[in-house]
Amino acid sequence: MKYIAAPWRQTYVQKALKMKKCVFCEALKQKNEADSLILYRGQHNFVILNRFPYTAGHLMIAPYRHLADFEKAPEALVTEATALVQLVIRILKKCYKPHGFNVGLNLGHSAGAGVAGHFHIHVVPRWTGDANFMPIVGETRVFCEDLTTTYQKLKPYFDREKEKQEK
């Protein structure tokens, strides 16, 4: 078996373990959605950009309620979250044209959850060859765009979706 080191994650995980406030709950408190990076609000969940993305377009779906245990979440919340995963994938396909996706939950600190107290679903667009030597050798990740650009690219897609639902 081969192991690949990801040393850049250690700093983030250690910082996340010390966080006093939940990043998702704090984002929901902000009045300006662009500052909070919230792209879409459903009935039970919202879609937000990851501030520490693996790739451009790395989004997360999180419930409004501060819930750690996915298995105890109400069915309506989980159903909507799954529908939002589908929506996010459709939008990312249109906007970024990735070759594939990683979709998943990291439940608990030992499973890699940076925010273990508020479960969330990651949707990470992937492209053939998007992994390179920089994170391992240089402890640096290279992105083709900043978060503001990503937000501005994606927001119109989510706004159109919201308009469709309101009709």
Image (cartoon, rainbow, N blue to C red):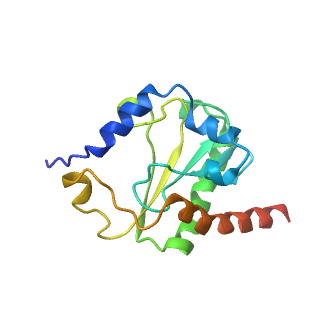
**Residue 46 visible in the current orientation:** yes
Looking at the image, the residue that sits furthest to the right is 167
120 is higher (above) or lower (below) than 108: below
Q: With 166 as the anchor, is 98 left or right in this view?
A: left
User: 140 left or right of 150?
Assistant: left
Q: Closer to the camera, 65 or 133?
A: 133
Quarter of the image where the C terminus is located? bottom right
Q: Is residue 73 left or right of residue 42?
A: left
Residue drawn at (48%, 31%), measured in percent from left and top?
A: 116
Residue visible at 71% across and 49% down in the picture: 32
Instruction: Say above or below: 142 vs 29.
Output: below
Q: Is residue 108 visible?
A: no
The residue positioned 50% from the left and 61% from the top of the image is 57
Q: Position of residue 104 (x, y in %)?
A: 45, 48
Residue 84 horizontal side relative to residue 100, left or right = right
Given residues 126 and 152, the one toward you in this image is 152
Among the 4 quarters of the image, the one containing residue 17: top left
Locate residue 144: give its quadrant.
bottom left
Q: Position of residue 93 (x, y in %)?
A: 52, 71
The spot of residue 123 in percent (x, y) is 49, 55
Q: Is residue 74 above or below residue 34?
A: above
Identity of the residue drawn at 63% across and 47% down: 36
Residue 62: image location, x then y, percent: 60, 43
Residue extending farthest left: 1
Total tally of numbered discs in the picture: 0
Q: Is residue 66 above or below residue 97?
A: above
